[in-house]
């Protein structure tokens, strides 16, 4: 089955371009488009796509708010959202990740990175544009969340600490397996254990926890 995607952008030419790029990728199919955030949320709830690709600046409901409605902390069954924008602004990226986005890209990322981000989100991984990943998380780690991060009741194992650092640096499960010379199933098991111990819902939140608790060297 192809990865089903909804594209939302207030500019028709941008939506058309994104659809053309994604539809040209094997195993990816754009099933709907939206020109504003409210319509995007409506379509996503009705069609339940594998991935939602949202621009940030949209009328009625921007991409960050749309992401929060579909993937925020209060959502029981969060969807996979990748945010894409023209604006390389740290506050946009941080807000998108806080809202529950699994990926963040700039519109000049190119077809390869775009398709990688969609595939990663569909597989439960996260892909953030390399130009903003470390800068963003390290910068905002200093400010931290509104409340201090709760330390896990059960301490992380040495291997989990290793996995934590690789996730924080944006590695996919396959890359982690290669880097640490362990099986893919072992990586998935450790990532699942990290989410349980840290009380987070996805690997983006694992990465943010790692930076906010100063686990990652500056």
Image: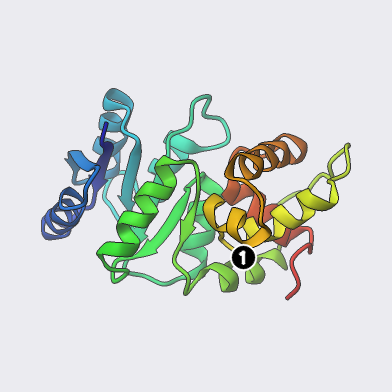
Please name the residue shown 58% across and 74% down the image. Answer: 135
Please name the residue shown 48% across and 70% down the image. Answer: 130
Q: Nearer the viewer, residue 72 or 203?
A: 203
Residue 63 in sight from this viewpoint: no
Locate residue 5: give its quadrant: top left
The picture places residue 7, in percent across and down from the top left corner, at: 24, 46
**Left or right: where 134 falls relative to 155:** left
Q: Nearer the viewer, residue 62 or 208?
A: 208
Q: Nearer the viewer, residue 84 or 182?
A: 182
**Left or right: where 196 falls relative to 107:** right
Count of labels in the image = 1
Locate residue 138: give its quadrant: bottom right
Residue where numbered disc 1 is placed: 137
Q: Is residue 87 above or below residue 70?
A: below
Locate residue 30: give its quadrant: top left
**Left or right: where 120 falls relative to 148:** left
Please name the residue shown 59% across and 58% down the image. Answer: 178
Q: Is residue 9 above or below residue 133?
A: above
The picture places residue 145, in percent across and down from the top left corner, at: 70, 54
Residue 134 in sight from this viewpoint: yes
């Amino acid at each position: 089955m192809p990865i089903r995607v909804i594209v939302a952008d207030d500019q028709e030419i941008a939506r058309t371009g994104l659809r053309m790029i994604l539809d040209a990728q094997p195993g990816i199919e754009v099933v709907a488009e939206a020109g504003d955030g409210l319509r995007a949320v409506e379509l996503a709830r009705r069609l339940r796509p594998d991935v939602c690709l949202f621009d940030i600046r949209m009328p009625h409901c921007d991409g960050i708010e749309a992401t929060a409605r579909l993937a925020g902390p209060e959502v029981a069954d969060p969807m996979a959202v990748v945010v894409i924008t023209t604006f390389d602004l740290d506050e946009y990226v941080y807000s998108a990740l806080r809202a529950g986005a699994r990926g963040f890209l700039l519109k000049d990322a190119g077809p390869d990175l775009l398709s990688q981000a969609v595939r990663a989100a569909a597989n439960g991984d996260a892909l953030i544009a390399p130009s903003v990943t470390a800068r963003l998380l390290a910068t905002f780690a200093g400010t931290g969340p509104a409340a201090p991060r709760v330390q896990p009741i059960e301490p992380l194992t040495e291997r989990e600490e290793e996995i934590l650092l690789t996730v924080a640096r944006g590695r996919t499960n396959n890359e982690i397996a290669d880097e640490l010379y362990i099986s893919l199933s072992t990586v998935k098991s450790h990532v699942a254990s990290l989410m349980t111990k840290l009380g987070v819902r996805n690997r983006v939140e694992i990465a943010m926890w790692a930076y906010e608790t100063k686990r990652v060297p500056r």
